[in-house]
């Protein structure tokens, strides 16, 4: 069995929503930079890919980004697959009114 060679993420500017990331044994996709984090201590949000045991999103700071986050090479995510559970929940809230 061939072992996958993960690439360490050293720079937050290289984060893309169409790339899979390996964090603590689970696969995630990058969502966005946390809007409420200060400029000198940025935080980044990741959402788990479908069919994972982990269902909640993860927020990591810059130090965790460069130590825990790895890019999975040759694994891309469809850019139109943005219909997450959060989006479904938000639209269902609007449908109730």
Image (cartoon, helix red, strand yellow):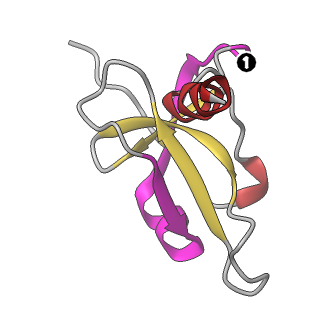
* Residue furthest to the bottom: 40
Label 1 sits on residue: 79
Report x, y in % for residue 51: 32, 18
Among the 4 quarters of the image, the one containing residue 26: top left
Among the 4 quarters of the image, the one containing residue 76: top right
- 22 vs 16, left or right, is left
At x 67%, y 83%, the residue is: 41
Q: Quadrant of the C terminus?
A: top right
Q: Is residue 34 above or below residue 91?
A: below
- 89 vs 19, left or right, is left
At numbered mark 1, what does the secondary structure look like: helix, strand or loop? loop
At x 30%, y 50%, the residue is: 24
Residue 73 falls within the magenta-colored stretch? yes
Q: Nearer the viewer, residue 7 or 77?
A: 77
Residue 8 visible from this viewpoint = no
Q: Is residue 62 above or below residue 46?
A: below
Residue 34 falls within the magenta-colored stretch? no
- 49 vs 75, left or right, is left
Q: Is residue 74 above or below residue 39?
A: above
Magenta region? 57-80
At x 37%, y 26%, the residue is: 4
* Residue furthest to the front: 97
Q: How many marks?
A: 1
Q: Nearer the viewer, residue 85 or 15?
A: 85
At x 53%, y 31%, the residue is: 89
Q: Residues within 10 Å of mark 1 (few under 14, many from 20)?
A: few
Report x, y in % for residue 22: 41, 41
Q: Nearer the viewer, residue 65 or 6?
A: 65
Residue 38 visible from this viewpoint = yes
Report x, y in % for residue 93: 60, 33
């Amino acid at each position: 069995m061939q072992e996958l060679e993960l690439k360490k993420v050293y720079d937050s500017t290289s984060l893309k929503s169409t790339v899979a990331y390996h964090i603590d044994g689970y696969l995630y996709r990058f969502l966005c930079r946390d809007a409420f984090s200060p400029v000198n201590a940025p935080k980044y949000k990741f959402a788990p890919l479908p069919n994972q045991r982990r269902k909640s999103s993860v927020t990591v700071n810059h130090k965790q980004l460069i130590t825990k986050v790895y890019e999975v090479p040759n694994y891309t995510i469809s850019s139109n697959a943005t219909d997450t559970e959060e989006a479904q929940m938000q639209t269902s809230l609007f449908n109730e009114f």
